[in-house]
Amino acid sequence: MVNVAKNLGFLLDATLRLDPQIKRLKASVCQKLRNISKMRPFLCEKQLQIITQALVMSSLDYCNSLYFGANQRILKQLQSLQNRAGRIIKGLKRRDDVEPHLENLHWLKIQERIEFKIILLTFKCIHGLAPKYLCDLIQYSSSCGRHVYLHCPVSSSSKAFSAVAPKLWNDLPQDIKKIINVNIFKNKLKAHLFRKSYCIY
């Protein structure tokens, strides 16, 4: 019996606890962060940010929609990696409060990065920009002009895209849901989730 399978570079274990994936991701990201930390004396903050986003944040974001609904232990481990990246860029000590600096970097926290990915996929499904197999998972409850409401299936798993996508979409403010340009939508969505990340009202 196979306990762990790899699909597109993502490790899925039999219980879907994601421990093998997180263990491998942490090892990879920590090695990258150690190397970036060694370069810190020779680079300015902007250069460090660009390198970190290219090497570290891209790793944390890869297939991150699969982390939706994961237990808090998993999410805390991912958040700690992002926090460490922020500390290296800002030259902070381990015990320093990193949250204001993550806000200064304009980074969404891990939970909101996951939601961003799922909501953006949902937008693309609604506007016919996603693959058909994803579009077919979306069911419409009602549509009035640009106000689209999605049906939330009661029986679906809470982690399934067909259940998660409608809930996240329906919870969005109407002024964001009515946007039809994908680039404007991404900017508005990030601003909305950024306020949620840092409790900005």
Image (cartoon, rainbow, N blue to C red):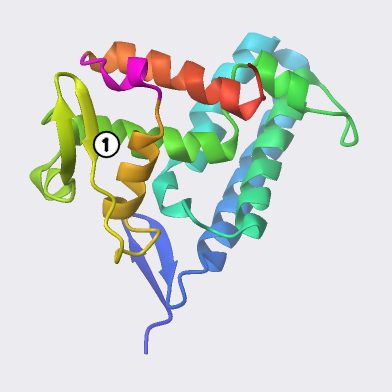
Q: Nearer the viewer, residue 118 or 171?
A: 171
Write the residue at 78% across / 28% down: 98
Position in image of residue 3 (x %, y %): 43, 81
Find disc 1 in the rendering and name its residue: 122
Question: Does residue 197 show up magenta in the picture?
Answer: no
Q: Residue at x 17, y 36 (%)?
A: 142
- Residue 164 seen anywhere in this rendered image of the structure: yes
How far across and how far down the image is residue 22, in percent?
57, 58
Q: Is residue 177 magenta?
A: yes
Is 47 drawn above or below residue 126 in the view shown? above
Q: In which quadrant is the N terminus drawn?
A: bottom left
Number of other residues with Cα within 10 Å of mark 1, as a class: few under 14, some 14 to 19, many 20 or more: many
In the displayed structure image, the side of residue 76 where residue 91 appears, left or right: right
Residue in the foreground of this view, choosing between 26 and 166: 166
Residue 107, can we see it? no
Inspect the image, locate mark 1, and give the three-letter code of the amino acid beneath it.
Thr
Q: Position of residue 124 (x, y in %)?
A: 21, 31
Secondary structure at badge 1 equals helix
Magenta segment, which residues?
A: 173-180
| Front-most of residues 91 and 155 | 155
Quadrant of the rendered structure where residue 24 is? bottom right
